[in-house]
Amino acid sequence: MKRGIHDTYHHVSQQHLKRYLAEFDFRYNERSALGVEDSERMTKSVKRIVGKRLTYRDSLPKTLS
């Protein structure tokens, strides 16, 4: 996992760690060795993002006022 994070992202923030781990989990569980082809994997990932929206503003840390 450490190699995958360093090679892909170079830096991982604590705030978004859950998202990075979810992506690695999905890619591992949906790999070709388990019989999941690229088209199936793409279909599954697109179905999972329906109704979800992440904007840049939402990704920023909350500031204290």
Image (cartoon, grey):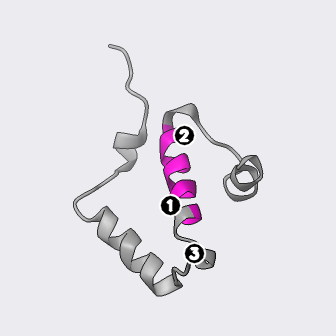
Of the numbered discs 1 and 2, the one sitting upstream in the chain is 2
Image quadrant of residue 12? top right
Q: Position of residue 28 (x, y in %)?
A: 59, 62
Tag on residue 17?
2
**Residue at disc 1, secondary structure:** helix
Vertical relation: 27 (above or below) 61: below
Pick whichever, 25 or 52, lies toward us: 25
| 17 part of magenta stretch | yes
Q: Quadrant of the C terminus?
A: top left
| 20 part of magenta stretch | yes
Q: Which residue is mark 1?
A: 26
Image point (57%, 75%), residue name: 34
Q: Position of residue 17 (x, y in %)?
A: 54, 40
Q: Position of residue 6 (x, y in %)?
A: 75, 50
User: Which tag is nearer the camera, tag 3 or tag 1?
Assistant: 3
Q: Which residue is mark 3?
A: 34
Q: Position of residue 51 (x, y in %)?
A: 22, 60
Label 3 crowd bin: few (<14), some (14–19), many (20+), radius 10 Å: few
Image point (34%, 41%), residue name: 58
Q: Which residue type does callout 2 highlight? A: Leu
